[in-house]
Amino acid sequence: MKIGLLAMSGIRAHDPELLRLGLTLPGFVERSKQIAALPSLGLLHLAAATPEGHELRYFEAEGDGKEPREAYECDLVAISTFSAQVFEAYAIADRLRAAGVKVAMGGLHVSVLPEEAAAHADYVAIGEGEQVWPRVVEAAQRGESPSCFRASDEPSVDVAQLAVPRYDLLAERPYNRFTVQTTRGCPWRCDFCASTVMLTQRYRKRPVADVVRDVQAILAVRPGAFLELADDNTFVDKEWSRELVRALTPLGVRWFTETDISVADDEELLRLLARSGCRQLLIGLESPDAASVEGVELHSNFKARRADRYAEAVERIQSHGITVNGCFVLGLDGHDTGIFERVREFAEETALYEVQITYLTAFPGTPLYSRLLAEGRVLEPGRWDLCTLFDINFRPARMSVDELRNGFHGLTRELYTSDAMERRRSRFHARRRKVAL
Ligand code: B12
């Protein structure tokens, strides 16, 4: 069969004021341009798990959410999407099926709401894809009637056996940032989190040698590529992390990852990171104060236990010359209108190199979504297109929707001007120099 792998790409936001600001504020534009240019690692893993004898093509939905013409030349198209673009993905699936192309869908959103997806796709995959995808391909080849395939019905995915994602399929495309996964899942369960932890609760680390093998495959396709580790939380196991970072260093790559604040506990790891080409760590701080993150992490209240020492931890990481992208989630139940100023102050005082603010967002399938729905606080249930992190889809506890929106706009204007960024960054460089002396 001719199999198409269709990625829903680009980034989405609907709030017109934020879009206007986004087009004018340097800090905003910079990061969105970077992240919009990432390929779908999920589809590349599926490509690697495809049974022999099929012709594979990788392509992307266009910026306007339409499918490329070549999709119609396929016998089967696999679509991968998150919540924000799921309606665009359903519309594409409907058009392809009307033209006689079989469609399979999977990914975070579809795994949570398979019945919804089943109205638009022949085959729906629930959970991690490596084991179910070959079943889907066989079903399509035999012309079997529509059905759902659950990862939980197959042997679980062994991350020590993952084949090299088919980065070679991207050779003709203009990507210069590539993703690789070193871990799956996260030991923490933050009530709002809708990352890989939704597919698998188990935290698993890949063998370091396999990660190196995958990075080499990327470099063979695009020498000098920038790497983003598509992990939920990379440096949980410090010993394994040191091994990973040591192994990445000789490859001479520049890279970025997401992890929790406990990375600051390990001086040796920080030293290794500084020498490894690691450009930035993205860390979900969520709020500058412990009280507002109380109860957010459901297993052991990890974030509340750590929040009092955030400033000190950021300082320690950055003193090694590793920039931190501190992420704040605005609209937590503990947040009132004072939160905007507190975030601004924290960013300024700690000289955070990069700051990311997003709205608390009720993603389907999260504990947060169930709770807010039960409390009647989800604004328009089913409006998955609002799950962008830059649109409000719930009623906050201690301020109105308008107060949250206005405060967010105001903070955006303050954080992302050239002046504010320059101030934070020059303080980062000054402190770094001081430590080096
Ligand atoms: C890379 C990335 C992107 C890239 C994606 C490139 C692409 N075309 O896929 C870009 C920058 C474009 C992007 C965009 C967005 N992203 Co993003 N992104 C990520 C990130 C960092 C890694 C995702 C990843 O590569 N995972 C690893 C792969 C291997 O896992 P996977 O995709 O789930 O695939 C596996 C299974 O799901 C399954 N599978 C997937 N698809 C299919 C299809 C079939 C047919 C089958 C059988 C199986 C299958 O098999 C795969 C292998 O096991 C995550 C955060 C994180 N740490 O996970 C956020 C994340 C996924 N993004 C998120 C968001 C909110 C967005 C945006 C809305 C941001 C915005 N404002 O525009 C958009 C939405 C895009 C969309 N399609 O809807 C949320 C999504 C939550 C949700 N449940 O919807 C996450 C979790 C971050 C967060 N803060 O919560 N993102």
Image (spheres, grey):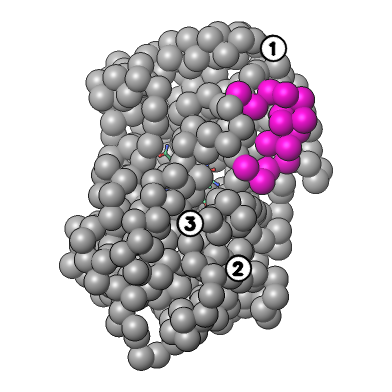
Secondary structure beneath dot 2 equals: strand
Q: Quick check: 382 above or below 171? A: above
Query: Which residue is at 35% across, 61% downward?
Result: 98
The nearer-to-camera label among 2 and 3 is: 3
x, y percentage for residue 155?
68, 80
Q: Residue 148 carries which label?
A: 2
Q: Quick check: 110 above or below 418? A: below
How far is disc 2 from disc 1 in space, using C-alphas? 41 Å
Label 1, residues with CA under 10 Å away: few <14, some 14-19, many ≥20 = some
Secondary structure beneath dot 1 equals: loop
Query: Which residue is at 70% across, 71% downward?
Result: 152
How far is disc 1 from disc 3 in space, using C-alphas? 39 Å
Q: Does the magenta stretch include residue 11?
A: no
Image: magenta residue range: 364-379
Q: Is residue 337 left or right of residue 102?
A: right
Q: In this view, does 115 lie to the left or right of 69?
A: right
Q: Which mark is residue 120?
A: 3
Query: Which residue is at 42% across, 66% downward?
Result: 103
Q: In this view, does 127 lie to the left or right of 433?
A: right
Q: Earlier in the sequence, mark 2 or mark 3?
A: 3
How far is disc 2 from disc 3 in space, using C-alphas? 12 Å
Q: What residue type is labelled 1?
A: Arg
Mark 1 sits on what residue?
398
Query: Which residue is at 46% across, 47% downward?
Result: 86
Q: Which of marks 2 and 1 is nearer the N terminus?
A: 2
Q: Quick check: 78 above or below 21? A: below
Q: Residue 81 carries which label?
A: none
Residue 429 in sight: yes
x, y percentage for residue 67?
28, 55
Q: Looking at the rendering, in which quadrant would you find the C terminus?
A: top left
